[in-house]
Image: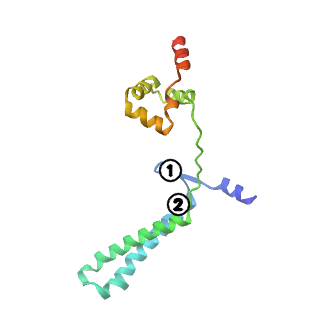
Amino acid sequence: MEEPEQKRSQAYVEIIGDTVVGKDLIMTISISVVLSFLGFFAGRELIFPRIAPEEMILSYSLLSGIAGSVTGLLVNTFLFKPKRTLNETASTNAELSEIYEKLQLDMEEERDSIVNDPVTTAEMKEQGFYEMFILDEQTQSDEKEKK
């Protein structure tokens, strides 16, 4: 019972168009920064002074810092799983028309561009989207009568 309460109490932050848990964001940044600095300083102080010419130590250390960043990316990927779920529902023509109306787009113009372009028509039929945009014959005649 505590787990759903914990999920509800998490604070979300919007960053670059994505919504994330604030605590997880701070942890991922911290992990990435620490591993990047560890890679850089390990390269500069421990690894490359022994094997590289002195003028190349900083350059090689930068590469080991980048390797630390990539390691941080991998660690964060395994530690923090996505928390959102995508729910796909098939849209009807009426729902799509309502969305276009809210966005102030012309649904008839969209339909005409689909019907007049055979490549788009073929792709939409192949993907199963064609029926969402194009009205069947009965609905088209009903809409014309209304106008």
Mark 2 element type? helix
Mark 1: amino acid: Asp
Mark 1 element type? strand
Which image quadrant for residue 43? bottom left
Q: Quadrant of the N terminus?
A: bottom right
| 17 relative position to 117: left or right | right
Name the residue: 42% across, 68% down: 70
Name the residue: 44% across, 69% down: 33
Q: Residue furthest bottom?
A: 50
Q: Which mark is residue 90?
A: none
| 3 relative position to 35: left or right | right
Return the x and y of residue 23 as percentages of the image width and height: 57, 61
Q: Which residue is mark 2?
A: 25
| 48 relative position to 76: left or right | left
Q: Are marks 1 and 2 in contact (CB under 8 Å)?
A: no
> Is residue 142 shown above or below 11?
above
Name the residue: 59% across, 50% down: 85
Return the x and y of residue 111 as percentages of the image width and height: 44, 26
* First-in-chain label (1 vs 2): 1
The foreground one among 147 and 102 is 147
Q: Which residue is mark 1?
A: 18
Q: CA distance from mark 1 to mark 2?
A: 11 Å
